[in-house]
Image (cartoon, rainbow, N blue to C red):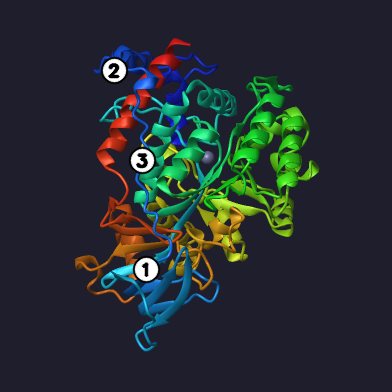
Amino acid sequence: MSCSCFAHNRFNRGFGLAGSTDFSNSAQASHASTAPAVDVESITPAQLTVKKLARDTNTHERYLIKGGFLYAADTANTVIANSWILVTGDKITAIGNAQTPIPEYDRLINAEGKLVLPGLVNPHWHESFVAPNNELPDDSALETTPYARGGNIEALSAMFAFISTVGQKLTLGEGIAIARWSMWTQLRSGTTALGDLGSANTANAMGQAALDLGIRLRVSRWGSDIMIPSGAREFKRIADTQAQADDWAALMETWNDHPSGLIGGMPSVMGAFGSSDEQLIALRDIANRYQSPYATHLAPLRNEREAVQHVFGLSPIGRFDKLGLLTDRLLAVHTAYASEEEYQRLIATGVNICHSPAHYGMLGEATNSETKQIARFLKDGVPVSSSTDGGISFIGGMPEAMRAAHLGHNEANNDNTSCPPTLTLRTGTLHGAQALGWKDRIGSIEIGKQADLVLINIDDWRYRLGNHPLRTFLVAGGSQDVDTVMIAGKVLVQQGRSTQFDENELLSDYRKAVISARTRIQKT
Ligand SMILES: [Zn+2]
């Protein structure tokens, strides 16, 4: 299911925690203790240079983005080969083609030789860049992940419980520095709106980092208060349910409907095998109070059903249904293992289905191909979204996620109409915006919507013989081809570089912060 930060149990093992599983590997643990080369004792959190980033404060100029090949990702499936877009302040105010007269403008962005897409929306992501990376550069330490072969529920629930405590161990400065670099890798690859599904960081640090970068974010807190030991008939409580609910209340109070217009809240739980009934009820209540989206991994693994049924007498989806959590504000991730009856309930209740197709092969999961249920949702018109999930380093952006959706579903279903290019684009834009409760604001290029746009270089040898540049981009392009990113009318990335800060400084702050944080976490 989620988060390669937990792949190979790297996260808690890297921190020297035994965990409750038999995945420990002394070779890797000792490898971890030999790093890092820097004198970590000399760096204190107070020395971190969490500077205020320069911001482009211009909000009144009119931009004309002219000459690009536009895919609007709207429901009418608008495509304009030689397009122009007028951006006034933070909004799209006019759209035209080569035949329509050009309106007045202040600044021109030449989009010739570029694809023009709505800002990419990544509704399911975890900020996890504090995790130690003990990966070896060859495959000599390769082992089966706890996600593979149906999933090791005991191992996963123990790991998720640990992750839910990591954010509290960071200083605010460390959290901001780590989140800035982590979010920069998303922004650089064309993501303009992120959905946090629980992170190894705090809501305050991530909210601040998103403001600093100018990226949109639904910020969360990882709810996980129980674990299910293998074969058990009772769960083990491993965290204070009320304390986690208090964190949700605090984050909603601070960040939901933030005056910047960029940030909202999205309370989340890891999944049906990580939450008590009290926690699920608390999730429902806070989401109802704020009428906000809320999120979970739902029916993501073949082995989860039996483990959950054993303890609760209900399936994972059955638990959510009974507690009134199946609504059109629920963002449900990796939902591949629903029964027929549950599948129909998910459609009838309007639950937003999301998946991370580029992530499954990395961890050894068969989420797309084993049941083919995600593709069935697509065929049935459900607005399925694509996402990257989280990792402890950059694991591909939304371009790679969309490629995997396009090629993966078509292959698994032996059908090239399973996930065609323009539908694929909507999984990476409009459908994600809907899942985040922001469909009226972002997700497509339409007059009146926020000016969140991505320009992608297509003027090279890969595109010479094709007539469908979006298809060519999906199969032969990637994150590196993103040239320009605009959010709310502000150009944040130009020619692949930040317009606001020195990328090296951001990386240097990140490195200082993780060394400082990891050292302290390992000691506790
Ligand atoms: Zn996840």
Helix, strand or loop under label 1: strand
Which amino acid does the dot numbered 3 rest on? Answer: Phe
In the picture, measured across the screen, residue 474 lies left or right of residue 311, that is left
Residue 284 x %, y %: 74, 41
Give the CA distance from mark 3 to mark 2: 20 Å
Neighbour tally class for label 3: few under 14, some 14-19, many 20 plus, Cα within 10 Å: few
Q: Are marks 3 and 2 in contact (CB under 8 Å)?
A: no
Residue at which label 3 appears: 394
Q: Report, in whole angstroms, how far the alpha carbon at label 2 lies from the one at label 1.
A: 43 Å
Q: Of marks 3 and 2, which one's residue comes earlier in the chain? A: 2
Percent x, y for residue 99? 37, 89
Q: Visible in this render: residue 3?
A: yes
Question: For the point 70% across and 54% down, which residue is it?
Answer: 346
> Which label sits in the foreground, 3 or 1?
1
Marks 2 and 1, the one that precedes in the sequence: 2
- In this view, the residue in front, 267 or 348, is 267
Which residue does the image show at 39% across and 87% down from the upper left? Answer: 100
499 with respect to 70 (left or right): left
Query: Element type at marker 3?
Result: loop
Task: Name the residue rendered at 76%, 32% in the picture.
Answer: 277
- Rendering quarter of residue 38: top left
Check disc 2 and report the residue beneath it: 35
Asked whether 175 or 305 is in front, the reply is: 175
State whether residue 490 is above or below residue 522. below
At horizontal 55% and vertical 24% (from top left) the residue drawn is 155
Structural crowding at the residue carrying mark 1, measured as other residues with C-alpha within 10 Å and reported as few (<14), some (14–19) or many (≥20): many
Distance from mark 3 CB to nearest ligand 1 atom below 8 Å: no
Which residue ends up furthest to the left in the rendered image? 461
* Amino acid type, mark 1: Val
Spatial CA distance of label 3 from label 1 is: 24 Å
Residue corresponding to mark 1: 116
